[in-house]
């Protein structure tokens, strides 16, 4: 029989449909991405084509060559742009708007066109997550910014339009409703229990251990209790900080390693599936509050979102997180 499970971070129900459960191997990508070349002359993100992506905001050199290894610039086709004021305009009570003020940046993760995060060395992925943190710190100083969303789309079904490995950063002048809701749930938990919700999840999952993939000194990787999708993965720090902007270099190194290992598991175990990863960090002004804890979630695109999900907001997950976690531990140990 299927089971409704409550996500403690959003108070949303998820259906774990164990009767429709597919074995983890059945979810493996049938047609893996063909391995591209290391350099493509026509790719706007490959070295040599930097004039196509101007307005660079950060660059991290490879110490061996002095050439850039990670590069950040403004998106050529931004969802939001930094000109103007974030004033609310209410032309009618039912027509409230704000100008599309914000920043939309691209983080090119490697100078190599075919270098995946899941295959990177420690120093390479450190520069990627360092770029995330440094840009977050900088964007927090902009007058219009209320929330920064850092994410990656890998593969066509995850929404990417360019093959060269890259992430995106969008700073918005409003706090998205979904983020605020998540924060409110954490505040309520803190007010009731006097403890941080995410540290409680870490403690609970380590105690039960069935949904834990691995841990290092600073992070735990789990398939959450109420996973919305097969192989949904969370990487949660063991030390509470509301904002990713506050993370130290040492912790960033460990985070980079945890992210690489997690994505390597998907790459090997599921044949390089399309996925999104999203970094959840507190809104501007909440950085030093004890309620929330920044973390990262990975959503592999192994199944489609259908009418029931759109109509109800309840996701039907055809995999059981305890089973997928066990499968992934097997992948890890056979590495
Ligand atoms: Zn390229």
Image: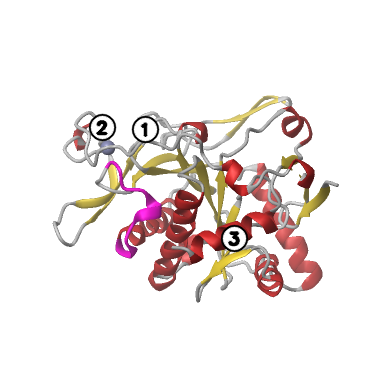
Q: Which residue is mark 3?
A: 286
What residue sits right under mark 2 in the picture? Answer: 43
Where is residue 181? Give x, y as percent. Answer: 71, 49
Q: Is mark 2 within 8 Å of ligand 1?
A: yes
| Nearer-the-camera pick, 106 or 328 | 328
- Residue 161 pos. (x, y %): 41, 30
Q: Are marks 2 and 1 in contact (CB under 8 Å)?
A: yes
Q: Is residue 160 left or right of residue 15?
A: left
Residue 322 image position (x, y, % from top left): 69, 59
Q: Residue sitting at 34 percent across and 56 percent down?
A: 120
Q: Which quadrant of the figure has residue 126?
A: bottom left
The segment highlighted magenta reads 113-123
The residue identified by callout 1 is 162
Left or right, 39 with reference to 262: left
Query: Is 172 inside the magenta-drawn segment?
Result: no
Q: Could you tell me which residue is drawn at 34 percent across and 38 percent down?
A: 74
Mark toward the start of the polypeptide (1 vs 3): 1
Q: Is mark 1 within 8 Å of ligand 1?
A: yes
Tell whether 175 sits left or right of 171.
right
Which residue occupies the foreground of this view, 6 or 107?
6
Q: Is residue 231 above or below residue 202?
A: above
Cα distance between the residues tagged 2 and 1:
8 Å
Mark 2 vs mark 3: in front: 2
Choose between 21 and 238: the one closer to the eye.
21
- Horizontal arrangement in the rendering, residue 327 relative to residue 139 (left or right): right
Secondary structure of the residue carrying numbered label 1 = loop
Rounded to the nearest angstrom, the CA distance separating label 1 from label 3 is 34 Å
């Amino acid at each position: 029989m299927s089971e409704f499970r409550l996500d403690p971070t959003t108070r949303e129900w998820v259906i774990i449909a164990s009767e429709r459960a597919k074995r983890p191997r059945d979810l493996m990508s049938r047609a893996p991405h063909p391995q591209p070349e290391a350099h493509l002359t026509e790719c706007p993100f490959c070295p040599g084509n930097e004039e196509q992506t101007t307005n660079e905001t950060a660059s991290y050199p490879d110490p061996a060559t002095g050439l850039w290894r990670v590069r950040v610039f403004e998106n050529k086709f931004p969802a939001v742009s930094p000109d103007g004021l974030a004033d609310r305009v209410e032309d009618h009570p039912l027509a409230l708007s704000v100008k599309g003020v914000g920043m939309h940046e691209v983080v090119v993760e490697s100078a190599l066109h075919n270098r995946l995060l899941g295959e990177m060395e420690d120093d390479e992925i450190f520069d990627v997550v360092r770029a995330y943190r440094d840009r977050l710190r900088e964007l927090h100083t902009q007058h219009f910014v209320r929330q920064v969303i850092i994410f990656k789309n890998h593969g066509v079904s995850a929404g990417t339009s360019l093959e060269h490995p890259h992430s995106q950063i969008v700073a918005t002048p409003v706090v998205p409703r979904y983020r605020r809701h998540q924060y409110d749930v954490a505040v309520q938990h803190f007010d009731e229990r006097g403890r941080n919700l995410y540290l409680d999840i870490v403690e609970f999952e380590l105690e039960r251990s069935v949904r834990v993939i691995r841990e290092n000194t600073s992070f735990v990787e789990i398939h959450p209790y109420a996973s919305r999708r097969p192989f949904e993965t969370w990487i949660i720090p063991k030390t509470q900080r509301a904002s990713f902007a506050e993370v130290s270099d040492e912790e960033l190194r460990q985070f980079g390693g945890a992210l690489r290992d997690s994505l390597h598991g998907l790459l090997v175990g599921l044949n390089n599936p399309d996925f999104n990863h999203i970094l959840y960090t507190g809104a501007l002004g909440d950085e030093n509050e004890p309620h929330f804890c920044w973390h990262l979630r990975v959503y592999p695109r192994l199944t489609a979102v259908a009418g029931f999900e759109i109509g109800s907001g309840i996701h039907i997950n055809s995999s059981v997180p305890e089973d997928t976690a066990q499968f992934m531990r097997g992948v890890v140990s056979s590495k």
